[in-house]
Amino acid sequence: MKIIMLGAPGAGKGTQAKKIADQYEIPHISTGDIFRANIKNGTELGMEAKKYMDQGLLVPDELTVKILLDRVAKEDCRNGYVLDGFPRTIPQAEVLDKALKERGDAIDYAVDVDVPDENIVKRMSGRRACLSCGATYHMEYIPPKKDGVCDRCGNVLTLRDDDKEEIVLKRLKAYHEQTQPLIQFYKEKDVLRTVDGTKPMQEVFDSIVAVLSR
Ligand code: AMP
């Protein structure tokens, strides 16, 4: 099953994508995580991506598309995957569509986790991430067992630079201008499924599982 997660930054699509990946035993592929790993390792790609990420802007399609296509061509993607944070622009969606079509393949579902802007800023200020292993938490909704410490690897949790309010507002602007048109794009392909992302995490997940079996 090949699934795309849509939704504003902070809508909870990353958390849901990880749960979907566990449930359906498919890889969770996050372009944001790939960029952050590259930043951490000081690669050229990471340094280039950071310039845009720090400003709340999208990384240019030329950099993003290649890493995604390379990733989905790997052996572990044979039975599908859940994409979190890709595509984020119509040209990205078209490239993915074309690459799949060439293999007689297509995306099965695009799940839009719908959350109004008002809720987003509040949610994002509570997010904490482990820059070491990539685990994510929320001070209110998914707190770590020990304050400020990653349950998984014991490293210190931080508020990502791009989760700071000023940057969040810019990311929301980029979302509305560049990413939201994808909702119509996938609706026309008849694969769009919308869930109410304001509900508690498990309820959102249950509604995703319900729409994926339709
Ligand atoms: P995320 O972790 O998905 O919220 O992504 C964090 C940041 O990485 C975004 O704000 C963008 O700057 C960049 N990014 C991630 N995925 C993409 C993408 N598909 N296209 C362009 N930029 C991206």
Image: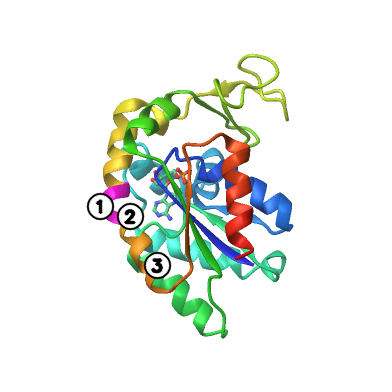
Q: Looking at the image, is 62 positioned above or below residue 164?
A: below
Decide: few, some or many residues near mark 3? Use Cα within 10 Å; few <14, some 14-19, many ≥20: some
Q: Where residue 173 appears, x then y in whole percent?
A: 26, 43
Q: Which residue is mark 2?
A: 180
Asked which secondary structure carries label 3, the reply is helix
Dominant secondary structure, magenta: helix
Q: CA distance from mark 1 to mark 2?
A: 7 Å
Q: Quadrant of residue 90?
A: bottom left
Q: Are marks 1 and 2 in contact (CB under 8 Å)?
A: yes
Asked which secondary structure carries label 2, the reply is loop
Report the mark closest to the observer, 2 or 3.
Answer: 3
Residue span colored magenta: 175-179
Ligand 1 near label 1 (Cβ, under 8 Å)?
A: no
Q: Where residue 42 appears, x then y in whole percent?
A: 52, 42
Q: Which residue is mark 3?
A: 187
Q: CA distance from mark 2 to mark 3?
A: 12 Å
Q: Which tag, 2 or 3, sits closer to the chain's start?
A: 2
Q: Quadrant of residue 92?
A: bottom left
Q: Residue at x 45, y 72 (%)?
A: 190
Between 82 and 210, the one lying in front of the other is: 210
Which quadrant is home to the N terminus? bottom right
Q: Quadrant of residue 123?
A: top left
Q: Amino acid at mark 1?
A: Glu
Q: Which residue is mark 1?
A: 177
